[in-house]
Image (tube, rainbow, N blue to C red):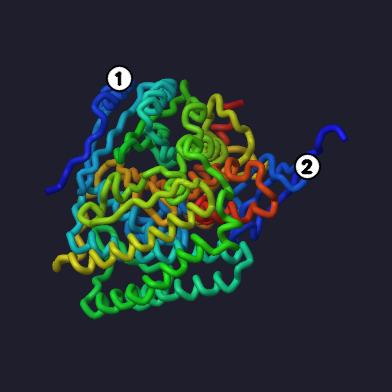
Amino acid sequence: MSGTKTFSMPLGPVHVALEEPVYFNLTVEGEIVRKTHLTSGHVHRGMEALAMRRNIFQNATLVERVCSLCSNSHSFTYAMVVENALCMHIPERARYLRVIAEETKRIASHLFNTAIQAHIIGFHSLFMHVMEVRELMQDMKETVYGNRMNIAANCVGGAKQDINLKKQEYILKQLELIEPQIREIQDIYANDPMVHTRTYGLGLLPVDDAIALGVVGPVARGSGITDDCRKDSPYAAYGDLDFNVITETGCCAWSRVQVRLRECYESLSLIRQCIDRMPEGDIRAPLGKLTVNSAVARTEAPRGEVFYFIRTNGTDVPERLKWRVPSYMNWEALSVMMKDCNVADVALITNSIDPCVSCTER
Amino acid sequence: MQIQRTGDAALVAELGTFATQQENATWQADDMYGNMTYWFRLDTPALLYPAAVALKAKGARLTMVSACRRDTVGTSGRYISYHFALKGIVYTLRVTLTDTEDSTPSITPIFANADWHEREMIELYGIHVTGQPNDNRLFLDEKLDAGLLEGAVPLSVMMNGACTTDLWERVLNGREDGEEKK
């Protein structure tokens, strides 16, 4: 028999890995994926256009709704970019409060992605267990901030709400409860034969490709790239706190999950350090003067670098507000990761970049 | 004590050479944490390519491209900002599109991750990007015209059509622009 026939296989737009729409057009040869073409744009909401019709305070509420899992990273980076444009300095206590909120969200986000991986593998008892552990963080967010997802912790000029001693004690107690459970989960994902067999060496992204494609977050760090905005250009209280940038060198789905789970330990440590070192004082600074100016800001969200650009024109409505989410940089890496993989692995590889469609399409 | 993180002096000088003809063509600013950002307004869009080559040679990473809608920029011209990160420092190159130079060169051959940004500019803002190697649609369906959102009339303007002149001015301006193009 001469030659092998390839054919086109549509996948999506719904339920490829998450319940968000993205459409793959796969060129397959038997069970093997030879080429991946991706089409997005099914849930474009025009949020950047909306942002240019709202004032800088209203936009804080709008951008928090770009995404649910990294909602805090959007309000955080947005507040920073406005503060940069208005040449503002926020109070020291607010810098620590911002880190507490961000790291709390990071743990919850990483556990969610980890759980979904178990779900795709078909290891449903593990999926349920990780989601149950994640509930500790959800409870914590609800108790401290009053909400499970959009916690509205940031505002332009600082933090929206303080965390009193009683709540600090409660947070520390929750961290005590969750830490041993995350250690147990990490051990399962590192060594369990079923998880290891399905994920180790799957969805390879060699370091050269990772650099060329400019991937960010755990996708980059899973390929050995030591890139983390919290270290590279410290913001909030990160410059005063001790933590490690977690990397793995396996370049595969297993490595990316290990980066996320090991980062949870760093987040737990960061929250404890913040509670220990947070000074007393104001939590908000007065608004600076609105002028004609341009500014940028970037933070390390759970999925990687979030980047914001603002141009102000002297009014309280921005002339331009643009943001780029980490998933936007990571999607293209799928064409490398899926090269010559099995069709059955497409969902698992897709999940390994922790994709967010609503972020990407804004 | 706060540490100020500054950029690569040689790179800043080199990028400055692409932005010498205009007033206030380069500037820098730091945030409250001491992280410096550098801004360069390039003389012409054609200079984007060699400036991007200089950034690539130093190991920079493209982080974002910000295009803007024509109706939001007033008389300042339609600009595109290209943001790059190198060792924690952000460098921004800004090109301005004019009637005579209404296209920008593709930098996808230099930075592979510029592909999505440029296709987004083409599809949503109708900006001409010369040499873009990927002509597949990213967001919009093939049946829709490129730059569709550029011509969209917001619902709020539409609903106020009876009591303001804004809607009709937009419609007339759009028609005049269309006639000029013909």
Query: Where residue B178 appears, x then y in whole percent?
Result: 58, 32
- Letter of the chain that mark 2 sits on in the rendering: A
In the image, taking residue B21 as reference, residue A221 lies left or right, namely right
Q: Split into 4 quadrants, where in the image is the N terminus of chain A?
A: top right
Q: Amino acid at mark 1?
A: Thr
| Disc number for residue A103 | none
Is residue B180 shown to the viewer in this render? no
> What residue is rendered at 21% in x and 48% in y?
B33
Query: Is A76 located above or below residue B50 in the figure?
Result: below
> What residue is rendered at 35% in x and 48% in y?
A228
> What residue is rendered at 42% in x and 44% in y?
A224
- Letter of the chain that mark 1 sits on in the rendering: B
| Mark 2 neighbour class, 10 Å CA radius: few under 14, some 14 to 19, many 20 or more | few
- Residue bearing mark 1: B17
Is residue A298 shown to the viewer in this render? yes
In the image, taking residue B58 as reference, residue A86 lies left or right, namely left
| Disc number for residue A7 | 2
